[in-house]
Each structure stands twice: as structure tokens, then as C-alpha cells.
Amino acid sequence: MCILRLTRKLLFCDRSDLTTVDKMRDYTNSLKGLPPHTIYKEVVVIGNGPSGLALSYLLDGNLPYYNGNSHPDEMLLARLKSIPASRSLVHQDLEYLSQGLEGRANNPVSLLMDALCHPCADQGIDLPSLIDWRYEPDQRIDHVVLGKGLPGGAWQTMDSNVLTISLNTWMELPGLTWFEWESKFRGVANPNARRVSVAEVAAYYSDYLRINNISRHFRSGVVVTAVHQLDGKSLEGVADELRSVQWNVEGFDLSTGESFSYICQKIVLATGSTDLPNRLSVPGERNYPDWVFHDLVSFEHAIDVLAKENPDIHEGVRSVDPVVIIGAGLSAADAVLSARFRSLPVVHIFRRPGITPDRMLPENMYPEYHKVHQMMTDRSGGYPDYTAYPEHKVVGISSFNERKIQLTSPDGQEIVHKVSLIAILIGSRPDLSYLPPEFQDGEKLGVIPDQPIDCRANPLSIDPWSHSLRCSPLGMYAVGPISGDNFVRFLIGGVLAVVHDIHRQKKLLECT
Ligand SMILES: Cc1cc2nc3c(=O)[nH]c(=O)nc-3n(C[C@H](O)[C@H](O)[C@H](O)COP(=O)(O)OP(=O)(O)OC[C@H]3O[C@@H](n4cnc5c(N)ncnc54)[C@H](O)[C@@H]3O)c2cc1C
């Protein structure tokens, strides 16, 4: 207990506090092999998307309580009624509460929090949340959230005009309902749950920090390049005081180039799934970055320019070479819609025989994706200036005299198309290159060992009750898509599991 207090006294500071910073320098300089000015935090969160935001809210002392509301699942309700109401879920038995829950997530605590925050959401029933959030300053945990871009993560880099797949209420994070945000902070009075634009979601996440007073925990515009486990050598001499410090996190500031270093007890990986676009791995794919794109935003900029350069394509006066879109997911569908909106001819290549971009999406809510599905499966030529190549394979991209793409049909025929632009939108995967070398490629970390991490097919293998990584030493957790929670409404449960475990371990340490 007294060791812990000493550690906190020496290290519970950041660099804005000059007197403590001086102590910090002396102290951290005595850690062998660590850069000067290393900062101590109890928890370092890598990634400032919705997962990082929600984590910071809970780590800042905002805890969830069952508020006594009813739930149609009688078994869940009975379990909720049987737990002490005066204790937050952070201090409850999550395994007991999550028993028998089923839904569209794989992680049990994710199902639990979703059932409590959005009861029966998938049945289309709109019921009040069973959770109240209470601020408890004595439950705060010192932490920093590091992120490459603006807080909000992937939502700050996606095409701002695209509509969400989820309803707005499913995009909300703990402690700020969408309607409260819209009515109090945007002057909008529309209480209907509906799809909203990416721009609105990004604005909600930006405001979330300020409204919940957690901005001070965020360090944005920085890239984490390495995470090391501290060994006995670096801790020699100060090991007693720092016995619970496990990790060193290093990186640099994108605007100044300055490096930074943190030491911490726990690390939470919240780096999402969108940093590395999947590639076709065909010749020429990487050679023409000015007309071959792997993300929707760059492609949209390029088609804007192309449409402006060819103002008379609307009247069909002048012809341009088609834009080629590769992929059958929602981003590829968005690209098709954008190109068609600008009257550009489209060649659409996809591996599947022509299924809907997402079979789960009901037509009345997602008419635009069903339109693209119709186009992909139409064999009558009913869509002028749109040509689908189902089950075709791209074999090369070249630009000798003209920009060209080569493909092969299912029966082996070779087809060559002149093109103006190409968008390769075939998904993305997480960039875990900052992990220790022994974890590189994530091959030891996945649910399926020795396979690269993929958020849908092979997320990080975690303990379901704590979200700690199974294959790493204690003190490393994962939340969000990298732990298999691919939608915002589910990642809240992962966040609860992590904070639950951090509080549990803190208590254990205090008792020793
Ligand atoms: C096109 C698209 C549409 C989607 N639509 C929906 C939807 O309608 N509803 C829904 O619920 N979900 C949707 N999702 C999924 C949703 O984006 C994710 O569930 C959510 O953003 C995950 O949040 P996160 O914080 O875990 O990760 P992210 O939002 O990806 O944020 C992680 C952040 O960490 C940063 N980072 C990564 N590595 C480092 C590093 N080394 N150093 C510093 N920072 C780093 C990343 O750059 C990123 O900004 C959609 C995803 C995509 C791609």
C-alpha cells in the first residue's frame, strides 16, 4: 500500500506541472535504457476512436449503475435485481450478469452492455436504458489516450457525406445520449432514431470530450511506434517503487516530430481496424498512387476533379474512360453511388457472383445499397454506363500509353479496360506493428493462431471477462474491432470489461 502511494506521489503527474516534472525527469532518467522525460501513467490507451473515448470516460471516474428500469429478458432482469444496487457494474460479477445472453456480438460483456444500454434494439423496440452513469472522483484512474488523428478515430477520416449503417442512438457513447447532444448542443429537435451522416458522428465524438470534461487525457496527432515490456534490467534500482509498472510506450508527434515515452501498468489497445487497406497484390497496384486509390475519401476527391474537368459528361457529349471500382462491400457500394452521382461511367469488379453488399440490411432502411445490389445482379444491361464483372479477377494495372486494368473472367478469358481512375475497396486490417517483435503480424495473438489478425475472421484472442490478451503478459487489453466488437454499440461492453479488471487488480494490489 505504502509502496503504491510512493509510486503515485512521485509519478502521478504530467509535464504541465513544472515542479513535479523535474522530479519526474530525475526519476525516469534513473530507469535504465528509457528515454529522458518518460512520463508515468497508470494506464496508456493507444487509439482515440470511440473505444478510446469511452474508456477515458470510465477511467475518469464515470461508472455505470443499474437504474432499476425493466427489461423484457426476465432472466437478465432477475439477475440485475439480485445484485447490490449501491454498487456499480464495474464492481459486479460480469460473468454472472452476462449468463445466457445472445446477440450479434461474440463477446459476452459486449452483449450485456448492449442489452442494458439498448434493450431489444435488434427487435426494433425502443426502450429506455437500464444504465445511469455516476461521477465518482475517488474512482478515477490516471491515464492518457494517444491517437494519430482527431479524437473520434475512424469517424474523422471517413467520407463525411456517407450515412451510417447504424441508427444515431447506436453511435452514442456512455454519458451523452444522441438526443441530448443534438438538442442541447446543436439546437436540433428531432427525437427520431435515424441514420445520420459520418460528419454528424464525427462532430458528436469531438464534442464528447469537451462536454464530459475529459479532453485533458487526450494527446492527439501522435503515433505510437513501439510497446516494450519492461524487464528487470530497466527497473534495477527502482524496482521496488515501480513494481507494478509493466510497459513502456514510445512514439512521436506528427507535427513536431518530437518523440515521447510513457511507462505504465496497463496498456489498452484500441487502434481499430482501418489503418491498413487490403491490397489485391497484383502488378502495378502500388505504382500509380495518383489514380489508383485504396480509400473512399481519396477516390471521391479524384472523381470530383475528374467530373470538373469533364463538365459536359452530364449531357453525354463527351466520354471519359470509366472509373473502376473493385470490391463488393459497403465502401465499394458508396464509391459506385458517388461515381454515378457525378455521371461517370463505372466498371465494377467483384469476386462474388453478385450478392447484396450486406444481406442483413433491410431494404426500407438502406435503399441505396439495395440499388447497388440490383445493379450488381442485373444481367439485362438496364443500367447504362455501369458494367458489372462478377467473379472476375484483377491480374494487373498498367500505364504505358494509357491507363489500363487487366482482368480474367471465371472461364479464363482475358479482358483489358481503359480506365481513368481505380478504387480498390476490399476492406482493411489493423496495423499492430507497434507491438513487441515477438507479437509481430499478430500471429501469436489471434483467435486462430498463426494467422494474421482480421477483425471479422481472426480478432485478437482475449479473456472474455477482462478483455486482456490471452497470449501476452498481464496488463495488456484490447477493445473495439480488434477484439471482435465491430460496432460502436458493442465496444462499450469491452470497455466495461477492461475497466472492471483494472479496478479489480488495483484492489488486489492495495490489499497486499
Ligand atoms: C466505412 C465504415 C462504416 C462504418 N459504419 C459503422 C456504423 O454505422 N455503425 C457502427 O457502429 N460502426 C460502424 N463502423 C465501425 C466503426 O468504425 C468502428 O466500430 C469504430 O470506429 C471502432 O472504434 P475504435 O475506437 O475501436 O477504432 P477506430 O475508430 O478505428 O479508432 C482507432 C484510432 O486509433 C488510431 N491508431 C491506430 N494505430 C495507432 C498508433 N500506432 N498510434 C496512434 N494511434 C493509432 C487510428 O488511426 C484510429 O484513428 C464503420 C466502419 C467503417 C470503416
Image (cartoon, rainbow, N blue to C red):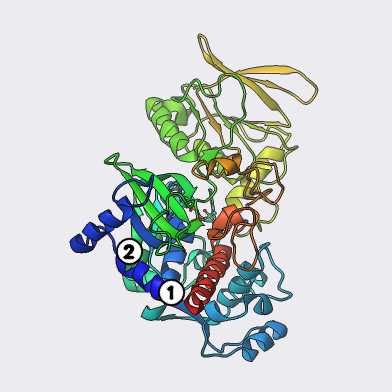
In the picture, the quarter occupied by the N terminus is bottom left
Q: Is residue 354 left or right of residue 160?
A: right
All told, the count of numbered labels is 2
Residue type, numbered disc 1: Gly
Dot 1 corresponds to which residue?
175
- Residue 344 vs residue 214, the one in the foreground: 214
Residue at the right extreme of this rendering: 411
Dot 2 corresponds to which residue?
11
Query: Of helix, strand and loop, which one carries label 2?
Result: helix
- Residue 452 vs residue 413, the one in the foreground: 452
Query: What is the spatial separation of the Cα atoms under label 1 and label 2, in whole angstroms?
Result: 29 Å
Query: Residue 127 sits in which quadrant?
Result: bottom right
Residue at the left extreme of this rendering: 18
The answer, for residue 333, to whether it is visible in the render is no
Q: Is residue 44 above or below residue 327?
A: below
Q: Is residue 408 above or below residue 93?
A: above
- Residue 308 vs residue 125, the one in the foreground: 125
Q: Position of residue 502 (x, y in %)?
A: 51, 69
Q: Position of residue 469 (x, y in %)?
A: 60, 57
Is disc 1 surrounded by few (<14), some (14 to 19) or many (20+) residues within 10 Å? Answer: many
Of the numbered discs in the image, which one, if any, rests on residue 272?
none
Query: Residue 226 sits in which quadrant?
Result: top left
Q: Residue at x 35, y 70 (%)?
A: 6
The answer, for residue 482, to whether it is visible in the render is yes
Residue type, numbered disc 2: Leu
